[in-house]
Image (cartoon, rainbow, N blue to C red):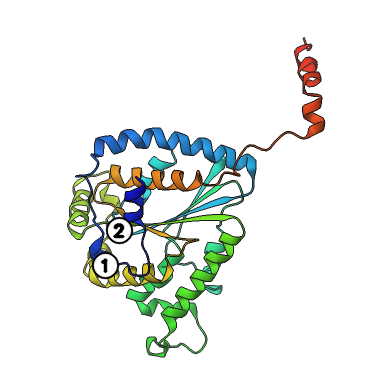
Amino acid sequence: MSGLKRQLKADSKFKMENYPTDISDSITPEDAKKELKRLRKELAQLQDVMYAHDRYSVLICLQGMDTAGKDSLIREVFEKFNARGVIVSSFKTPSSKELQHDYLWRHVIALPEKGKFGVFNRTHYENVLVTRVHPEYLLRENLPEIKTTEDLPKDFWRKRYEQINNFEEHISANGTIIFKFYLHLSKGEQRKRLLRRLEKEDHNWKFSPGDLEERKLWDKYMESYQEAIQHTSKSNAPWYIIPADNKEISRYLVVKTVLEELKKYKDIQYPELPEDIEKHIHIYKKQLESEK
């Protein structure tokens, strides 16, 4: 897995076409599903230790095109977690209140507490992805001196990348371990999944005609993702490009990556009992055992 993980990690030279959307020739969906069941238990146990340790938090960022499998991945990967240990935040169109603040505000207030996992289902990167494809959305932010999209300065996006990098560097330095996963779905597989949405009664409520309009902008989205990942995959907050054409495999790769990275933190352990409690622990046990 270590070699595969290096292949998944992106750098400043990231090119979308160099990363596969399907690796079922390397691991079968059946094997991935089996490993997921084992590893998610191990990850849940590690989170319990982190909760007691109370020094780190974990932020997992999930990005991907519609139907990439974000919702089901969250459900399957964190199934064994204690409910107190993980908080999922889904970021849709900003509310009127959120638009009264800077674009990072709603993400800052959703950051996980120490000892907990926070999962961002869509993330602060929407502000350099969706708005890059639809720059007119920026006008709702009421930014100074920007009344039309033509007012956007040439370095606008570069500055946003810098702001996001600074934000992630700050929270990383203060104990948040960051994982960023791009669920790399092929356009052909998205077509199949959209068709399934229409065909299945328990799924077609998810379908919107807008899905097809966004699909027409596929190439623009790929360009925006590529540039954003190139500028923001850093050692303290790397991007992992997860093949997403098969959901079992993508879930396995995410949990495997998180678990392997967290195991590198050798200081994450259950805290030791205070000396005065440990010294008298036999007395406390005797006291409880003597109760009728």
Residue 66 circle label: 2
* Mark 1, residue position: 214
The spot of residue 276 in percent (x, y) is 82, 31
The amino acid type of the residue labelled 2 equals Asp
Above or below, 221 against 110 in this view is below
Foreground residue, 195 or 26? 26
| Residue 163 in view in this figure | yes
The spot of residue 104 in percent (x, y) is 52, 68
Residue 145 circle label: none
Marks 1 and 2 in Cβ contact (< 8 Å): yes
Label 1 – label 2 distance at C-alpha: 9 Å
Instruction: Tell me if mark 1 has few (under 14), some (14-19) or many (20+) residues whose alpha carbon lies within 10 angstroms of its own.
Output: some
Instruction: Tell me if mark 2 has few (under 14), some (14-19) or many (20+) residues whose alpha carbon lies within 10 angstroms of its own.
Output: some
Q: Residue at x 32, y 74 (%)?
A: 133
The amino acid type of the residue labelled 1 equals Glu
Marks 1 and 2, the one that precedes in the sequence: 2
Above or below, 14 against 58 in this view is below
The spot of residue 58 in percent (x, y) is 53, 51
Above or below, 33 against 94 in this view is above
- Quick check: 218 left or right of 159? left
Q: Residue at x 35, y 54 (%)?
A: 6
| Residue 97 in view in this figure | no
- Quick check: 51 left or right of 71? right
- Element at badge 2? loop
**Quarter of the view holding residue 176:** bottom right
